[in-house]
Amino acid sequence: MRYTNMIKIEFPDGSIREYESGITGMDIAASISNRLVKEVLSIGVNGQTWDLTRPITKDAAVRLYTWDDEEGRHAFWHSSAHLMAEAIQSLYPATKFGIGPAIENGFYYDVDPGEGISFTDKDLEIIEKRMTELARQKNIYKRTEVGKAEALKNFESKNEVYKVELINDLEDGTITYYTQGEFTDLCRGPHLPDTSYIKAIKLTGLAGAYWRGNEKNKMLTRIYGISFPKQKMLEEWLKLMEEAKQRDHRKIGREMELFTFSQNVGQGLPLWLPKGAMLRDRLEAFLRKVQKKYGYEQVITPHIGNVQLYKTSGHYQKYGKDSFQVITTPQEGEEFMLKPMNCPHHCEIFKSKPHSYKDLPVRFAEFGTVYRYEQSGELHGLTRVRGFTQDDAHIFCTPEQLKDEFKKVIDIIFIIFNALNFKEFTAQVSLRDPNDTQKYIGSDENWEKAEKAIIEAAEEKGLQTTVVLGEAAFYGPKLDFMVKDAIGRKWQLGTIQVDYNLPERFELEYTGADNKKHRPVMIHRAPFGSMERFVAVLIEHTAGKFPLWLTPEQVVLLPISEKYNPYAEDILNTLKQADIRAILDDRNEKIGRKIRDNELNKIPYMLIVGENEMENNSVSVRRQGEGDKGGMKVNEFINLITQEVEAQIDAIHNY
RNA sequence: GCUGUUGUAGCUCAGGGGUAGAGCACUUCCUUGGUAAGGAAGAGGUCAUGGGUUCAAAUCCCAUCAACAGCUCCA
């Protein structure tokens, strides 16, 4: 009898079982239940994700991953990427391979099809078909450990230049291959046991991508795909993507007549239509109200500033070339720039008079329109534009007040997000890249102070954050709030930035209790981020069904039995004067019934003006979900709706 | 900016070397008290812009502009 070691395997619930050394994840799943054998995709071993077929030879804490776990899906999609590479290699042998990872939703592979060859959508179908054939072969994903020299030799002989470059960066002794069928790839793993798990495949797109993400490198062809263990899951996913398209703010924005673009006006310069302007107005009014409570003062500054202003702030040196061009005037040597940010103007406002420590904090707010030259390929609906309005404010405070002020800004952002029901957001602390401090202005000491203040304030507010190095603004670290759009792209909305540098560059000061001059600390903040991007995300989150206090169309007027109803027009005008948006629906009555019964869930109130109502000078009011409220005079209705909107806004404050 | 795709009526799109099509929407009229009503008539397009090839270009070629997807970038 062969001598075998026993090892201890610990499960997530803390229980421990003994197994023979060399046991695999698959064996462990089998020892638990048959169902698990079918569902398990990869295994966590002491925090690392492993193949299910890789032997475990030491005591370990394990966790079995299925489709419900990111680690499980990751292995699934990573294996799908290899499968795609195998298909491409068999169909187009000249192809050289870059990297092919799993991503949040699916996988991609960067490939170099060779000189003069490019893939088309038709190729995707062919590759997809070949993948399905290969998947059915049930080829095993085999893991092999290799030495660096051997790996280099192997890939050099195949002229896989990208792989060779990758291997050169790897340490000897850590290199592994994975082989399935005819395809061997340099890969860390983990992978599925075999290709038969992959039942449904959809190659979703074709794009260019720079090798290793560097725009100086060659551009490879990136093929995106997604795969599932069941055909039905693929169908559901395709349906979900279709639904997401319906929520696209560019589609809804056009349909609801909120905004538009014109080639004549220019790329990335949105034109707000009356209804969109109304929506934006209400958002601004709401924030103004909140800010007033928090002690902000509104200011207004011009859209251009002397070049000297941006030289003082450091923006010119940093971004001058990339920003909009300098505007020159007939006056010799006079140069202006379109303002790319509001901070320098606000610094000058602070400087316009001496300040005592007793005045601080000073909070200047402005819905400031700024212009930035974004690369043309970056522009996207309302989320990335060249002219946009920040809900900007700058707080000047003493170093002691900094943390408290920072926390108050977090509160405002919470009020906004709560008001609009944004539940799924992430908070990101962006610090400077410690290896590249040249990119930033200001002393190390100030940076450290600012970074510490942000981290502590976020912690004290109980905010879960992810910390990212190298993402800070060039003048200071920041806390950003990100939300996802309809198809899962991340966008930065609210931002709070601590700045020790501009006060220094502008020589801002206040007189302290000691009768000496001190330098204030500055906070930049924009809870919405920009009105444009915020409205875009708002549209996609609500699919155009805005809350009552924002909705551009609150009321449907529906005259019954009358083609033309002069009384209805009167009501419409009265409502407009009270800033209540209404549409007069004098189309065929049957369509009116349809609106009443099917669409009332989108429209909070409906007014019905029939013959009876005309006779006694009233309207018949229906409230969403409540049915008839009965007849009332128009002024009574205006009071009702005004109270409801106020109540909604108050409720937001007292959340 | 880079790679790829696209640009035809207000919207969604078909067509395609011989001077423009559908559905929805719109206008006028008729019919109809019932869950996206039906009928009749009508209006609306230098087929993104500029150049080239051709007897002839919306169609083929080139350039420009714009949009879309991705990459890079993002104060």
Image (tube, rainbow, N blue to C red):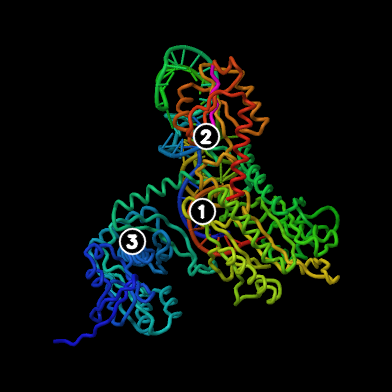
| Pointer 3 with pointer 1, Cβ within 8 A | no
Disc 2 residue type? Ile
* Quadrant of the rendered image containing residue A473: bottom right
Q: Nearer the viewer, mark 3 or mark 1?
A: 1
Q: Secondary structure at mark 1?
A: loop
Asked whether residue A187 appears in the rendered view, the answer is no
* Dominant secondary structure (helix, strand or loop) of the stretch shown in magenta: strand
Q: Chain of mark 3?
A: A
- Where does the magenta region start and end? A605-610
Outermost front residue: A654
User: Alpha carbon of mark 3 to alpha carbon of mark 1: how far?
Assistant: 25 Å
The residue type indicated by label 3 comes to: Trp
**Whether residue A573 is visible:** yes
**Which of the two labelled residues, at mark 1 and mark 2, occupies the earlier sequence position?**
1
Under mark 1, the amino acid is Lys
Separation (CA) of disc 1 from disc 2: 23 Å
Depth check: give the residue in front, A265 or A451.
A451
The circle drawn on residue A67 is 3
Mark 3 or 1, nearer chain start: 3
- How packed mark 2 is, by other alpha carbons closer than 10 Å (few <14, some 14-19, many 20 or more), is many
**According to the image, label 2 marks what residue?**
A603
